[in-house]
Image (spheres, grey):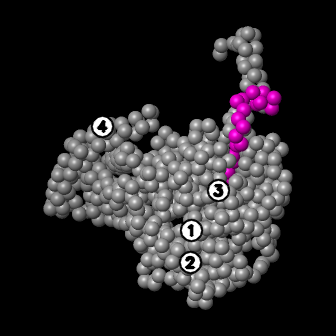
Amino acid sequence: MKSISRRDFLKTAMALSAGSLLSLSPALRGLKAQSDKPNIIILVFDAMSARNLSVYGYPRSTTPGLERIAERATIYHSHYSAGNFTTSGTASMLTGLYPWTHRAINLSGMVRKKFVDHNIFSLMGDEYYCTAFTQNYLADVLLGQFQSGIDRHIVTPSFYDQLDHPLLGQYFSRDPVPAYYGLDDYLFSGGVDRVGSVPSTPIFGLLNHLAHMDQDFNRALPDYPYGIPNNTFYSYENEVVYAGVLDEILNLSSQQDPFLAYFHLFSPHEPYRPRREFTDIFPEMDFPFKRPTKFSTLDIPNESILWRRKTYDEFVADVDFEIEKLVNALEDSGVLKNSYLILTADHGELFERGEYGHVTRLLYDAVAHIPLIVIAPGQKSRRDIYHPTSNIDLLPTLLQIAGKKPSTNLEGKILPGLGGSEESRSLFSMEAKECSSFGSLANGATISMIKGEHKLIYYTGYPKRPDTFELYNLKEDMDEMKDLYLLDLVTASQMKKELLDTFEANRKLT
Amino acid sequence: MLKRLPNFHAVVSVYAVIASMLFAWSLLLFFWYLPSWLHFMTIGDVIAVFSYVMAASFFESLTFLLFLLLLCFSLPSNYLRNEFIARGTSITLCVIGLIMIYLRVNNTYITNILFSRFGIWPTLVAVAVSLLLTKIHQVRWALISLSDRLTIFLYILIPLSLFSLLVIIIRNIF
């Protein structure tokens, strides 16, 4: 081996020292170009229902951390997702458009070609350095589609513990969408076990199925009595993921100004797998029993639903612990002095009417009502916003924060409390997984409309089911137990007309 | 060592059967998805997806061929090598056909039950029966004729696969 001369040694040592200083010294960090625009950090928690968070009044103390964070944040109490699962909910949040417009309505779906550049990353412009990461493959398809506006797209299998399925798309980072569809989703059915999925490579696809047939994902581990958290493709530990997210944000803040950081984290999405210290922390509780409706596709016994709800609540508590740790670390590092921190979800999770989860035709409050907590730079006191808002409002709000002129094509409004007003308007959510995304949404769709304190739900086009309306008063009947459709005829007819007119105007592709 | 392998003509004939089956399956599904993809992807992206599909099918077909050649190499000549076209075609039709049936049933749980309850035995029995059938002159003739006729597709499939590989390389470099 060639010996190192004293001169070489000194050169290497100096280079290493300089590198360390540049990355560590707060004083030198200040040498980067300064901008008067705030940074924006968005943390999305998959399938986190506002209805199960104690910060929103849930009887189980699932989110003591968020409750403490809320004391120095703006809390949106009536924030709704425009979709009831990852693809539609995330696409609406990132594009500021309703699902009937962007049409990412099916599992693994994408937004229409004409809206590919109509997203949070592209609209922020070159001024903002955009980083994006998601642990959810359905959301990563969207990030792949929006990649031209993203400066750093962190691959989904980052921070993983154990890979459970082959992920070939990650090796083609310059070609994310075709590689994902051509390889992971289409050839191997992505391991997502979608209904109707057939691997298009029969031999490789079958081998993939067989290789994972006997895997016991539910095996108990000392730290994880229900098994380790898993996103279908890989197992992960939230502690590791959140530490990785913190590192990414700290690196960003030391190198880029301003930046937009988007992190879409999989927990508390099913499977609900809290760490040991969060299991059995809640006593058994009774919740209002809600019978399956004619649009429920499952009929799970109530005991089973209650058990799943308990493990979900425990998982939420686990996630809450990590969120608080992350937010405190960001605060201590000084990143939040010039950053907006947005905590939200892509959709909720329901445990009622014979169903659990969010792959459902139902659009009751639990699956559409999501958290939104915003910490503005230097915010020290709590602010509560009760006015109904939608996740399509996030994009125009961020554009306003970034000093951009909101696009006229946006369907959302600037959030009250962040520059917007509490004007009266109707908010919509839509479920149409069973419909062709480029058709007229005729093969089974559910649309909900919230106006003031009322919510109208419309089921249409489901085979062997008549079109049906349900009306609830969310203020008096938060659990949506009493259908007022035939009781409050005036409200029902007014809302019905508006909903049908809006749906008719949007159901056909233009 | 090469003496333990079948001649080039026989290999090409059996490969034609493998490739025809696997590419046909992939293309069939590709065209099922195509209308949706056209709506959400640019033509360039759709061509790229097509390229990934073709390239994967190409490697899959080569993998299966390799499996047959390994069998040929390991077994006594009379078992497979000397009747490679008929028996190779028979094994191909049987194994890939059964896999397609399993997948066409299209229920992971059913596939799991079939495999976990009966293991690989249904496939092995089917392969054994099909090999026995090649003793019948008419069956052997039919298999050889089939593989011979399918060879024509290789003139399309192989250039298409190579073109697809080229597209993937270009898209991931530039």
Mark 2 and mark 1: Cα distance apart in space: 14 Å
The residue at the point 19 percent across, 55 percent down is: B146
Residue that carries the numbered disc 1 in the rendered image: A429
The residue at the point 73 percent across, 57 percent down is: A417
Q: Tag 3: residue type?
A: Ile
Residue that carries the numbered disc 4 in the rendered image: B2
Q: Secondary structure at mark 3?
A: loop
Please report the bounds of the magenta region as a residue range: A26-45
Earlier sequence position, callout 3 versus callout 1: 3
Residue A348 percent coordinates (x, y)? 64, 67
Q: Nearer the viewer, mark 2 or mark 1?
A: 2
Q: How many marks?
A: 4
User: On the picture, is A495 further left or further right than A245?
Assistant: left
Marks 3, 4 in one chain? no
- For this rendering, which residue is in front, A424 or A189? A424
Mark 3 and mark 4: Cα distance apart in space: 73 Å
Q: Tag 1: residue type?
A: Ser
Q: Secondary structure at mark 4?
A: helix
Quarter of the image with the N terminus of chain A in it: top right
Which numbered circle lies on residue A414? 3
User: On the picture, is A167 further left or further right than B27?
Assistant: right
Mark 3 and mark 1: Cα distance apart in space: 18 Å
Residue A438 percent coordinates (x, y)? 40, 62
Q: Nearer the viewer, mark 4 or mark 1?
A: 1
Earlier sequence position, callout 2 versus callout 1: 1
The residue at the point 55 percent across, 44 percent down is: A122
Mark 4 and mark 2: Cα distance apart in space: 79 Å
- For this rendering, which residue is in front, A391 or A345? A391
The quarter of the displayed image where residue B171 is located: top left
User: On the picture, is A289 further left or further right than A437?
Assistant: right
Residue that carries the numbered disc 2 in the rendered image: A495
